[in-house]
Image: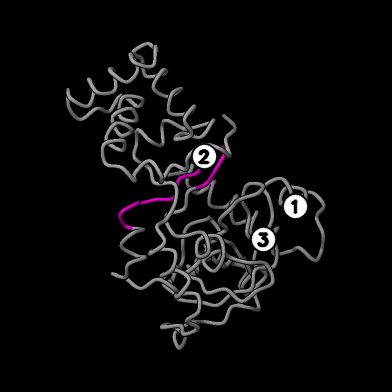
Amino acid sequence: MPSQDKPSKSSWKDEEKIWSRIESLEAYAIDACKSDEQRETAGMILKEMGLAKTTSSAVKLLTDIGYFPVHVNLDLLKMKIPTDHSEKITSAAQSLLSDSSDPDEVNRKNLTNLKVYAIDVDEADELDDALSATKLQDGRINVWIHVADATRYVQPGSIVDREAMRRGTSVFLPTATYPMFPENLAMGAMSLRQGELCNAVTVSVVLHDDGSIAECSVFNSVIKPTYMLTYESASELLHLNLQEEVELRTLYEAAKLRLNWRRQQ
């Protein structure tokens, strides 16, 4: 049967008796039966269908009827990792986007004068951290670590915050990303965006000449990311040794100082 003619996954829940059998098959497929009755129900269905009583047979049957996608990731099911957000959570996230107020606006430092480099893997879905570096008058290096400020949109204890706490983390796979926040937040407003004003939490660190930390501070900020680079493109820029990218060379110098200091500890 063509995939477009198969029942949707949600339609299997319409009848309690059918849904109970589907649940038994799914539990059998991922070796997670909660009772002997569930295991026996799955085995009976497989026998009636002329299939072997194996997990792979259960996976095949659920795929054939359209309940599982063709390339189902069983590890996600075994670990009970949610792959989407409920309509309630998505709607709540959309409401947050329409609220232009910033509870920390008066406390944010304007760092839009800094050149900001966001460096990550190619095709990263969430860009949530970036770096800056400047030389102080005494020759020491000031490194700035910027992290996207999720609390700009999500207040502690809110429904979206509680859902993120329940998930605990975003899940990154070679084939897909499952963010703990709805995509319109995680990959949109909460991400750092090139050339746009972005709210962040910034850690400012001043290094001694030996790479040890002379002083540091943490504060809310507003930044304007200058470059979105892959690790490869950042390396290429360094090798080009462009005069206009002195800040990137300063970052590299700071990295070497810290590496040497840590090796001596």
Residue 198's image quarter?
Answer: bottom right
User: What type is the residue that disc 1 sits on?
Assistant: Leu
Question: Residue 183, position in %: x, y?
Answer: 51, 59
In reply to whether residue 231 is colored magenta, the answer given is no
**Magenta residues, start to end:** 165-177
Residue at 39% in and 11% down? 50
Question: Residue 74, position in %: x, y?
Answer: 42, 30
To which residue does mark 3 refer?
Answer: 250
Residue 187's image quarter?
Answer: bottom right
In reply to whether residue 173 is colored magenta, the answer given is yes
- Single out the mark in the foreground, 3 or 2: 2
Residue at 41% in and 46% down? 10
Residue 160's image quarter?
Answer: bottom left
CA gap between label 1 and label 2 equals 30 Å
Residue at 53% in and 64% down? 184
For marks 1 and 2 on the same chain, the one whose residue lies earlier in the sequence: 2
Seen in the picture, residue 73 relative to 11 is either above or below; the reply is above
**Colouring mode (rainbow / by chain / secondary structure / one colour):** one colour
Instruction: Please tell me whether mark 1 sits on a helix, a strand or a loop.
Output: helix
User: In the drawing, what numbered circle is on residue 238?
Assistant: 1
Residue 255 as seen in the image, left or right of residue 261: right
The number of numbered badges drawn on the structure is 3
Question: Residue 118, position in %: x, y?
Answer: 63, 59
Q: Nearer the viewer, residue 53 or 153?
A: 53
Residue 158 as seen in the image, left or right of residue 196: left
CA gap between label 3 and label 2 equals 33 Å
Seen in the picture, residue 31 relative to 95 is either above or below; the reply is above
User: In the drawing, what numbered circle is on residue 85?
Assistant: none
Quarter of the C terminus within the rendering: top left
To which residue does mark 2 refer?
Answer: 173
